[in-house]
Amino acid sequence: MTATIMPNTAHPEGFPTVVRLLLNVGHAIDHMFLLIFATAVAAIAVEFGHTSWTELMPYSVGAFALFGLGALPAGRLGDLWGRRSMMIIFYIGMGVSAMLVALTQNAWQLAAALTLLGAFAAIYHPVGIPMLVQNVPNPGAVIGLNGLAGNLGIAVAALVTGFLVKWIGWRAAFVIPGLLAIACGVIFALTCPRETEAPSKRKGGKAQVALSPKMLVRAFAVMTSAAAVSTILFNFTTNGNSQLLAQGFSGVIDDPAVIGTLLAIIYTIASFAQIVVGRLIDKVPFKPLQVWISIIQIPLLIWAAHTQDWWLFIALLTVMVFVFGAIPFTDAMIVRYVDDRLRSRVAGMRLTVAFGFSSLAVWMLGPLVKAIGFSNALWIMAGIAAIKAAIVMLLPEEPAPEPVKV
């Protein structure tokens, strides 16, 4: 199955620098807010009267389920109503719902507030990323930088949450970022130009790769399946790494702030993999690059399953380099195969399936680790990485893209 690369004649629309910056900050906010709970869960469990963090972890599944399910209506509204308006709702909604989490008094209130947070978090990927890449000549590089921003949000969640929990308490870890999100929403509303028409009514913005209807259906199926499997790995690692490091360093480092700092270092270094991969997407054949990044994860996850303390730190760092490095492919596939007038809706459909399915990883994390331990769970993740590599093999064959002049 082969495809044809279409010549790129588009020009950037020229969003003001502050708008491009805020769109990238929005990605950081999106991932940061969803993982504050994963870093603070041990402290919350103690306050709510639970004996272990594993008992409280399943209460966050609603956030990740809505993160996926909410992407479908969010993407549709982004295309048919407007991406600017949806992004303003995203910033304000994230801020308000984060502060509601801080007001909760028991596990079920916490679950409800986190679910609301997940609903607003669902807006970013199908709306913010298509808005950022619309008509740019180098989407891989733009997506790579955006991915770096998103994963730096994960690093900030690990670092800042650890210190806020230690110094002020877990509630402040939600309130302070919530106020930041609301401020970003206000600035975005003041600086982002109003849309003259909804994306669905615009002309231009064609897909990079011309596919027949049959090939497009196949590509969408592969895209969605690969994204679902990839997100299982992403959700398991990003939600479980804090407790994995705490267990691996037990008796060596027991300060949650230090563990959070180590995790932030891992995420910060690993995040730069997306810059490298994003640039490679614009320069080398798409399919083999994605296949090999998936394959390399398998031995690294097995290595992490059998290490402790500082060797675990190194193993986890290498695992996250390739887990994060795989992220740009999902959004790059949307740009590659889908007209801009449909991108938010297609992204919403893909995210609904992928994140809805992979939210099971969050729900199962606590019970799975409690039942079989982190080592065996990491072996399962290695098997899932192998499944992803097999799925990606079904993508269309493409020639290498022409070099992009920026």
Image (tube, grey):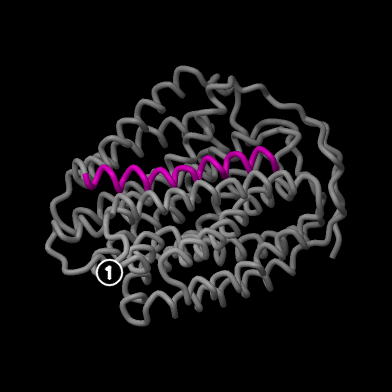
Q: Amino acid at mark 1?
A: Thr
Residue shown at the point (40%, 45%) measured from the top left: 32
The image quadrant that residue 222 belongs to is bottom right
Q: Position of residue 38 (x, y in %)?
A: 33, 56
Q: 276 or 36: nearer the eye? A: 276
Seen from the viewer's position, the closer of residues 252 and 134 is 252
Position of the N terminus, as image quadrant, is bottom right
Q: State whether the magenta stretch is mostly helix, strand or loop.
A: helix
Determine if the magenta segment contains residue 204: no
Q: Look at the image and give the residue range highlighted in magenta.
A: 140-166
**Which one is nearer the viewer's eye here, 94 or 352?**
94
Q: Is residue 370 left or right of residue 377?
A: left
- Residue that badge 1 annotates: 54
Mark 1 is surrounded, within 10 Å at the Cα level, by few (under 14), some (14 to 19) or many (20 or more) other residues, namely many
Question: How far from the left and from the top, in percent, is residue 190?
Answer: 45, 17
**Residue drawn 43% across the image and 68% down it:** 361
Seen in the image, is 40 located left or right of residue 384? Answer: left
Q: Is residue 266 above or below residue 250?
A: above
Quadrant placement of the C terminus: top right
Image spot of residue 335 (x, y percent): 69, 45
Where residue 145 sits: x, y (%)?
61, 39
Q: Residue at x 51, y 73 (%)?
A: 381
